[in-house]
Image (cartoon, rainbow, N blue to C red):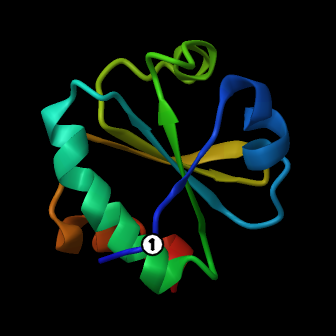
């Protein structure tokens, strides 16, 4: 089992994500989203393996509508990686672990 990911809210997003000195992965999800539940344990595994290089956070889009709207998150799950306050990568939809590792290789190497 992987490491539990911390949640981030609209109010904390700027300080926690955009001002972070290391890359931050944010999983935009919702309770009712089946694919989100599929991808969650995979992200927790990646957090356990790569949490030293990448901060893993999750944001509930129902509870925090502002940030997803600002970043045009229209489908979930959406996994965004932010580097130095900028959106560096966006992965939309549930993907298997191997595919996610490949997509995130730039940030976990």
Which quadrant of the view contains residue 52? bottom right
Callout 1: 10 Å neighbours few (<14), some, many (20+)? some
Which quadrant of the view contains residue 7? top right
Quadrant of image for the N terminus: bottom left
Is 63 situated left or right of 2 in this image?
right
**Residue pictured at 83% horizontal, 64% vertical:** 21
> Can residue 85 be seen in this snapshot?
no
Q: Name the secondary structure under disc 1.
A: loop
Is 75 situated left or right of 50 in this image?
left
> Can residue 69 be seen in this snapshot?
yes
Residue 73: give x, y in percent of width and height: 43, 23
Residue 41: give x, y in percent of width and height: 27, 62
Is 40 situated left or right of 97 in this image?
right
The relative height of residue 54 versus residue 78 in the rendered view (above or below) is below
Q: How many marks?
A: 1
**Residue pictured at 77% horizontal, 34% vertical:** 12
**Residue pictured at 45% horizontal, 80% vertical:** 48
Q: Which residue is mark 1?
A: 3
Residue 69: give x, y in percent of width and height: 54, 13
Judge by depth and name the residue closer to the eye, 44 or 104: 44
């Amino acid at each position: 089992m992987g490491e539990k990911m911390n949640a981030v809210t609209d109010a904390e997003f700027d300080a926690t994500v955009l001002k972070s000195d290391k890359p931050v992965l944010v999983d935009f999800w919702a309770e009712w989203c089946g694919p989100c539940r599929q991808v969650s344990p995979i992200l927790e595994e990646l957090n356990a393996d790569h949490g030293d290089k990448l901060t893993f956070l999750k944001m509930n889009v129902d509870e925090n509508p502002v940030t997803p709207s600002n970043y045009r998150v229209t489908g979930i799950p959406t996994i965004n990686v932010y580097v130095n306050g900028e959106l560096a990568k966006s992965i939309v939809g549930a993907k298997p672990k191997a595919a996610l590792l490949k997509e995130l290789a730039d940030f976990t190497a």
